[in-house]
Image: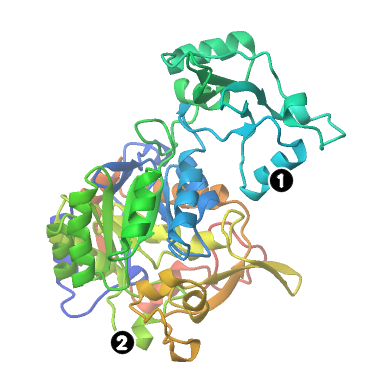
Amino acid sequence: MINDYMRTFMDSQGYEALTFNDVSLETRYADFLPAEANISSLFSRNISLNAPFVSAAMDTVTEATMAIEMAKNGGIGVIHKNLTPQQQAEQASRVKQYLHGLIPKPVVFHQNIKVSELIAIKEEQNYNFSGFPILDDQDRVVGILTSRDIKYLTNYDMPVQEVMTKDLVIGKPTTSMEEAYDIMRRNKVGKLPIIDKDGRLCGLYSFHDVRTLLKNIEPNFTRDAKHRLRVAAAVGPYDWERIAALAEVEADALVLDTAHGHSKGVIETLRQLKKDYPQIDIVAGNVCTSEGAAALCEAGADAVKVGIGPGSICTTRVVAGVGVPQLTAVFNAAKAVGSDVPIIADGGIEHSGDVAKAIAVGASCVMMGSALAGTEECPGERILHQGRTYVIYRGMGSIDAMRKGKGSRERYGVDAEATTEKLVPQGIEGMIPYRGFVADVLNQYIGGLHFALGYCGSRTIAEMQENARFVRVSSAGLHEAHPHNVIVQKDAPNYRAT
């Protein structure tokens, strides 16, 4: 909800559009410490976040590893669509299987497979867990293989049946999560196979996951009703095969992701998705006008994604001459939809203060690309340049992204059969310094947002939108806001000069 002061301020700009560096927030009275502020918000109508941060659906930013870390830090990741439908569904499935109560379909192996073959498959599939139920030729459970069983092996060519644990502690199909926890704790086992009266596997409990869930050890995790991490995935208009594959693995949200969201294909697909998959939240975008946001809202969007050309690697505003500076674009969308539908500010976030400004004009959360692209968890290629590690980061409208993936061409409405020479890119490829782990990067953004709420006298995101006031910043004021008249000797973790 946008307050009256902010509405008057933004409307008074007339035909001039603003972005983050054009304004600054005023302080307001506070009777609490910044750390006491609650930054929980919404990603979409039915998905709440403990921290309002979303990783972008870009092929150098978000796959399963990034999405897992985003959810563990209170946000959510959007798996990019420059993958086949099956590959993208596998990435989403990895996130859903990372943390859960009962695993309904655990990975299993048969008893005649060699240990070396099992390890090779585990590495190839990037399974980040151990503890595999072992089945006989009739698919009955005959044992379980854990890391403890193979830890001291020297001969990996042995059949699994000669190494596995055969004396099993098991549960019944009626065993609850609480009962499973008690059984595993008493018997000091890390895995509890659930087996029916015919000896067949019905599921698997993991002690680590069950303990985390029951004891609420990680309260900031973004989780669904079944205690699994939440994940979203990008899809395009009419991409029914991809949509069905993602629905099958129970992705929490589908992001109908195009360069021009205020279009026939997006609206038609959105309406059909709301009919076919009412259990899945549908995010639609991108738009930069009130009319675009209102059209998507009317078609049933559970969130509207805003941003045409604000990203550091996007050239749409230069190539096409189209787009609205991001602060005004977010305001336009929020003004059109009110408090009914969450607004996702996609792009243009450079410093943590930009997050606060986006929220002040109505955003529920922000989507970030370049801010996260240099981290350990991103899939971007790492290179060594002049003795320093960098990570490749490219726009989904760049030549390389469109050449390598159908999803990029689809997003920008480019002919799938066009040769490289015929492509007209709307993005570039570059490199950014390696930044370490995404948890550390998010910690700086989360901390900055806490400070912003503290300075603005707002205990919550909603209060921030009720209380926030902007002042217009001149070029001299912008210069004053940044470090000046010094030679920076050591970079801060949350600031870099532009």
Q: Secondary structure at mark 2?
A: loop
Any mark on residue 227, and which?
Answer: none
Amino acid on which the number 1 mark rests in the picture: Ala
- Give residue 473's quadrant in the image: bottom left
Amino acid on which the number 2 mark rests in the picture: Gly
Residue that carries the numbered disc 2 in the rendered image: 321
Picture coordinates of residue 272 (x, y %)? Answer: 19, 57
Q: Residues within 10 Å of mark 1 (few under 14, many from 20)?
A: few
**Measuring 29% from the left and 78% from the top, which residue is drawn there?**
323
Q: Nearer the viewer, mark 1 or mark 2?
A: 1
Q: Residue 256: in sight, yes or no?
A: yes
Picture coordinates of residue 187 (x, y %)? Answer: 62, 10
Q: Is residue 410 left or right of residue 16?
A: right
Q: Residue 25: in sight, yes or no?
A: no
Q: Secondary structure at mark 1?
A: helix
Q: CA distance from mark 1 to mark 2?
A: 51 Å
**Measuring 41% from the left and 48% from the top, which residue is drawn there?**
76
Q: Look at the numbered discs 1 and 2 and tell me whether their residues touch, using CB distance below 8 Å.
A: no
Against 458, is 133 above or below? above
Q: Nearer the viewer, residue 203 or 494?
A: 203
Residue that carries the numbered disc 1 in the rendered image: 120
Q: Nearer the viewer, residue 435 or 304?
A: 304
Q: Is residue 268 left or right of residue 186?
A: left
Against 396, is 172 above or below? above
Q: Nearer the viewer, residue 197 or 454?
A: 197
Picture coordinates of residue 180 (x, y %)? Answer: 50, 15
Mark 1 or mark 2: name the one nearer the start of the chain.
1
